[in-house]
């Protein structure tokens, strides 16, 4: 796992391992928005810079799918009159995403493709874990919880897709 992947995985896992830390709906809204934006930013870069067509296509899919999730989340929190609340997890996700982008911008060709896809595998595994252990259990609003449950299969599909692309590139750097 790359250093940045570890930072992002840790950011998502901290609330789950802390056990006592509880997130509220406003914090969940911020975490969801930040997590999606991190993947949109990385996907945008991959769509522009990837050397392999399957990596470029995966980046484009991440932009499209995560933008769609963000749109649904924004519509829901607006309807519920919930203002996303910045919190240590969303801040850590943003910092990790920025660090990942900075690292990816130094790479080209196969090295870029491999680093991006390895990151996507680690990131989606961490997101699924956070959705299962922190976000769904922490959501008090039934509609917010339902949205998280509804989008979870897409994250699982993204993880499986990323693993297939990773295998086509020759495995992970772990």
Image: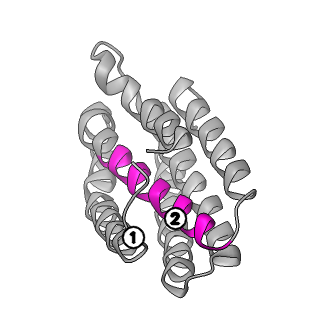
x and y percentages locating residue 65 in the rendered image: 47, 71
Among all residues in the image, which is located at the extreme top? 20
Of pointers 1 and 2, the one earlier in the residue sequence = 2
Label 2 environment density (alpha carbons within 10 Å; few <14, some 14–19, many ≥20)? many
Q: From the image, which quarter does the N terminus lie in?
A: top left
The verdict on residue 122 being magenta is: yes
Q: Kindly identify which residue carries mark 2.
A: 114
Picture residue at 55% right of the left edge, 61% below the top? 116
Among all residues in the image, which is located at the extreme bottom? 53
Picture residue at 28% right of the left edge, 57% below the top? 152
Q: Is residue 52 above or below residue 140?
A: below
x and y percentages locating residue 16 in the rendered image: 30, 26
Q: Is residue 82 visible?
A: no
Judge left or right: residue 159 versus residue 85: left
Looking at the rendered image, the disc whose residue lies closer to the viewer, 1 or 2, is 1
Tag count: 2
- What is the distance, in whole Å, between disc 1 and disc 2 at their CAs? 8 Å
Q: Write down the quadrant of residue 110 in the picture.
A: bottom right
Q: Is residue 126 visible?
A: yes
The verdict on residue 157 being magenta is: no
Residue stretch in magenta: 109-128
x and y percentages locating residue 165 in the rendered image: 39, 74
Colour theme = one colour
Q: Kindly identify which residue carries mark 1.
A: 170
Q: Secondary structure at mark 1?
A: loop
Q: Secondary structure at mark 2?
A: helix
């Amino acid at each position: 796992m790359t250093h940045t992947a570890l930072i992002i995985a840790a950011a998502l896992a901290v609330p789950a391992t802390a056990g006592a830390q509880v997130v509220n709906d406003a914090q969940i809204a911020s975490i969801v928005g930040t997590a999606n934006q991190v993947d949109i930013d990385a996907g945008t870069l991959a769509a522009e810079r990837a050397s392999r067509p399957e990596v470029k296509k995966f980046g484009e899919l991440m932009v499209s799918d995560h933008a769609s999730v963000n749109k649904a989340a924004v519509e829901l929190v607006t309807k519920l009159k919930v203002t996303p609340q910045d919190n240590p997890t969303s801040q850590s996700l943003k910092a990790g995403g920025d660090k990942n982008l900075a690292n990816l911008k130094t790479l080209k060709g196969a090295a870029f493709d491999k680093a991006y896809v390895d990151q996507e595998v680690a990131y989606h595994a961490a997101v699924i874990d956070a959705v299962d252990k922190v976000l769904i259990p922490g959501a008090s609003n039934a509609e917010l919880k339902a949205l998280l449950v509804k989008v979870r299969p897409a994250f699982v599909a993204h993880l499986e897709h990323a693993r297939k692309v990773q295998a086509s590139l020759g495995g992970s750097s772990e």
